[in-house]
Amino acid sequence: MDKNSRYTVDSSILFRQWLNDTREMVQDTIFHSRIQKKNNNHLVSQRVFFEQNAHSHYFSYRNNKNLFKENPVSYIRHQSLYNVLKNLKKGRYNPDISIDLHGLTQHQAQQALGELITTCQKEKIFCAHIMHGHGKHILKKQTPFWLSQHPDIIAFHEAPKFFGSDAAIIVIIEINSLKKNINIFN
């Protein structure tokens, strides 16, 4: 053990003698300015924001309380699409996307619904699940009213118990490819 400790003491003395004539190096760091890259992400985000806002402009703030008093809430855009509503009531459509409106203001909820419709049309998703909750019944009453005003909503109905019962809605959204061939729902 003495040999090992002596060896380290001797080596540290040699190291100090060897570095005795050295001096500290001056750091000459050069800071380069960052080059601003032009990218199209800003333009893409503006376009997406515009599309989402365009869908939320269909929703008005006027309150028509007599429109959706029946329970369960249901809506079809045209009587020729009654089979879609019938299949929706039977639970034959499983939603591929879901949105939760809990804790949102009416304006935020309208924007979120606009984003949902935009996303569904881009991703070719025709069935969506909207959780509005019970709360003070503000969003519960307004959400069906807003959805009935939008031209791309084919039908909606109160969600089955598994998806939230009367605190949620299952929506069928018209997609551009479905506008040409509506018989896909039969």
Image (cartoon, helix red, strand yellow):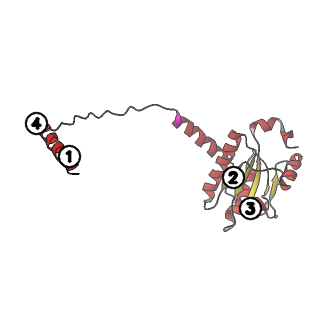
Q: Residues within 10 Å of mark 4 (few under 14, many from 20)?
A: few
Quick check: can you spot residue 99? Answer: yes
- Label 3 to label 1: alpha-carbon separation: 74 Å
Above or below, 72 relative to 180? below
User: Where does label 2 land, which residue?
Assistant: 98
Q: Residues within 10 Å of mark 3 (few under 14, many from 20)?
A: some
Local SS, label 2? strand
The Cα–Cα distance between marks 2 and 1, rounded to whole angstroms, is: 68 Å
Local packing at callout 2 (Cα closer than 10 Å; few below 14, some 14-19, many 20+) is few
Q: CA distance from mark 2 to mark 3?
A: 12 Å
Residue at image position (79%, 38%) is 178
Looking at the rendered image, the disc whose residue lies closer to the viewer, 4 or 1, is 1
- Residue behind mark 1: 8
Residue 92: where, in percent of width, then height?
A: 84, 51
Q: Residue at x 68, y 39 (%)?
A: 122
Specify whether 31 is left or right of 58: left
Q: CA distance from mark 4 to mark 3?
A: 79 Å
Tag 4 secondary structure: loop
